Image (cartoon, rainbow, N blue to C red):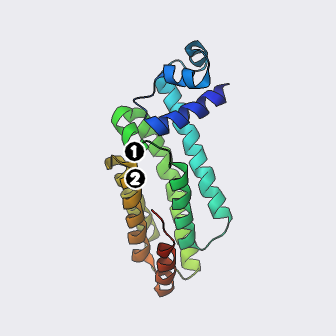
Amino acid sequence: MKEKIISKASELFLKLGFKSVTMDDIAGEMCISKKTIYKYFCNKEVLIEESTSAVHKQVHEVIDSVVAKNYNAIHENFEIREMFRDMFKNATDTSPLYQLKKHYPDIYQNIMTHEIDQCNHYFTDNILKGIRENLYRPELNIDLYVKFYYTLIFHINETTVSEREAQKIELEALEYHTRAMATEKGILELEKQLKKITI
């Protein structure tokens, strides 16, 4: 039951917003009593914490599944972006990260600490792969480029109210990031990926 509550709460939080969804809404959607929810979660903040943790886990499972398909480094980044777009397509127009930062800053800070560690790992692996494939320049300062990219992506999500707008800007950031690192071969692959995009 606990997992079912987390799953439904996550869905509602992303769809309607962290602030606007009440424990009554979740109970109503699940056809259970509010008392049942409080049996597992002492308050809404604890439920938000567990829900964001579950979404965080789901996000990284999505990334792992794309990486396992062994696309080239540039294609991989575009596939991950596409998977995120699908994952958050039913989200409220207000960016989930923006809402979390505004209304639940402690939970947001906790999530971001873990997120930055995970992103460091994924972005580093992607750059090393791209260098091996001759898609990215070999002389790159990898740590610096990783930091540039996650600073850019997190800043977009923290400061852009609209989820749709955030996704458009993220695509620009991905192109910007890729062009900054790409070899001639990489630019050709980037152009190929950009032609396939539907925003």
* Type of amino acid under label 1: Asp
x then y, percent, for residue 191 = 47, 79
Position in image of residue 55 (x %, y %): 55, 42
| Residue depicted at 50% across the width and 49% down the height | 89
Percent of width and height locating residue 91: 47, 44
Q: Please say whether residue 81 is visible from this viewpoint.
A: yes
In the picture provided, is 167 more to the left or to the right than 31?
Answer: left
**Dot 1 crowding, Cα within 10 Å, few <14, some 14–19, many 20+:** some
Q: Which mark is residue 164?
A: 2
Left or right of 175? Residue 30 is right
Q: Is residue 46 left or right of residue 70?
A: left
The residue shown at (41%, 70%) is 175
Residue type at mark 2: give it. Arg
Task: Tell me if I can see residue 154 in this picture.
Answer: no
Give residue 148's quadrant in the image. bottom left
Q: Is residue 195 above or below residue 9?
A: below
Total numbered labels: 2
- Asked if the residue under mark 1 is in contact with the one under mark 2, i.e. CB atoms within 8 Å, the reply is yes
Say which mark, if any, is on residue 93: 1
Residue at 58% across / 80% down in the picture?
133
Q: In which quadrant is the C terminus drawn?
A: bottom left
Q: In this image, 176 relative to 47: left or right?
A: left
Residue 79 vertical placement versus 50 (above, below): below
Residue 95: x percent and y percent?
40, 45
Mark 2 secondary-structure assignment: helix
Please, what secondary structure does the residue beneath circle 1 have? loop
